Structure formats: C-alpha cells, structure tokens
Amino acid sequence: MLISKNIVVHLSYILRDNNGQIIDQADASDIFEYLHGHENIVIGLEKALENHTVGDKISVSITPEEGYGRFDPSLIRKVPKYEFPPPMRNPEPGQFMQIEEDGRWRLWRVDSVDSQNMVINGNHELVDQDLHFEVEILGVRNATSEEVDNGFVVSTLS
C-alpha cells in the first residue's frame, strides 16, 4: 500500500539541524503515527513520503517554507493577564498554552510574564530552520472513517 491521503503511517525518524545535531527522534518502539494528507506533520515531509511504502527509508531536507515557516513578528504578542482565565494568568516563561483564535487552535510559548502582562510567541521553536529527516516507514493502513472525519489518528497500528 502506497502512502496517500487518508492513510495512517507509522514511522521512525531522526531530525537534525544544519550542524548535524539531533533535534528530535522516534525509533521503532515509539508509536509515531500520523494521518497522511491532513497537515499533521510538516508539509515538506508529508510531500516527501507520498507514494512510499513499508520498508522504504528516505532522507530529505526541508526548507523553512515547507517546515515550520519563517519568523512572523505578528505572532509575538503582549497580552494583559486579565484576558486569560484565572488558572492561566501566572504561567512560567517557556510554558506552552493552546489558544483558539478565529476558530483555529495555535500553540503559544510564554516568553515573559510581569505583574500585568505576558508576552506570548506563536512562532514554532524551529522557525527559520532547515530540517533534515532520516525516515523509515514501519507500517501503513487505511484510516478509519472516524479518523478521516477527525483529521487525525484515533487508534494505533498493532
């Protein structure tokens, strides 16, 4: 079965930066699965995996435009604490918050906090970076109707 839209993919990977340092990895014992064609992984990697199958090993370098994008200064915001519910008003710098805006959820990192405000940053920590993946495809299967409807994997490969 070839990887295409609505296929659940189980893979292992090593992600490196331009200096060859490992940024992230998942080996065969990790359950790293995603639903192909639903933007659940960076678009450049999703494109590179298209039409591959179990056992394929690929190496791919992805530019920021097809990875985590370019730095966007509009995603740095100074927000009054009172705009957040009480349990969210005193986060630690470096903590993440998921915030809905215009019907879309985005993960925001707290950059700083003072007595009145917090500065939040919606740029991904790998913004502006090339991504170098080594990937092995460990399993593929058709997605369930529930997974297709939800846009993400609900169950795991066995």
Image: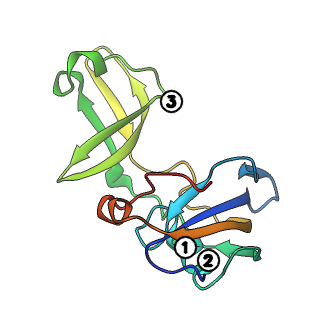
Residue 46's label in the rendered image is 1
Residue 34 x/y as whole percent: 52, 60
> Tag 3 or tag 2, which sits nearer the N-term?
2
Secondary structure of residue under mark 1: helix
Picture quarter containing residue 132?
A: bottom right
Picture quarter containing residue 121?
A: top left
> Tag 3 or tag 1, which sits nearer the N-term?
1
> In this rendering, which labeled residue sits more in front, label 2 or label 3?
2
- The residue to which callout 3 is attached is 94
Disc 1 to disc 2, C-alpha distance: 5 Å
Residue that appears at 60% across and 83% down: 2
Residue 144's label in the rendered image is none
C-beta proximity under 8 Å, tags 1 and 2: yes
- The residue to which callout 2 is attached is 49
Visible residue check, residue 34: yes
Category of crowding for the residue at label 1, using alpha-carbon neighbours closer than 10 angstroms: few (below 14), some (14–19), many (at least 20): many
Secondary structure of residue under mark 2: helix
Residue 78 x/y as whole percent: 29, 35
Q: In which quarter of the image is the N terminus?
A: bottom right
- The three-letter code of the residue at mark 2 reads Leu
Residue that appears at 66% across and 66% down: 139
Residue ranking furthest to the bottom: 51
Vertical relation: 79 (above or below) 37: above
Residue 24 x/y as whole percent: 70, 49
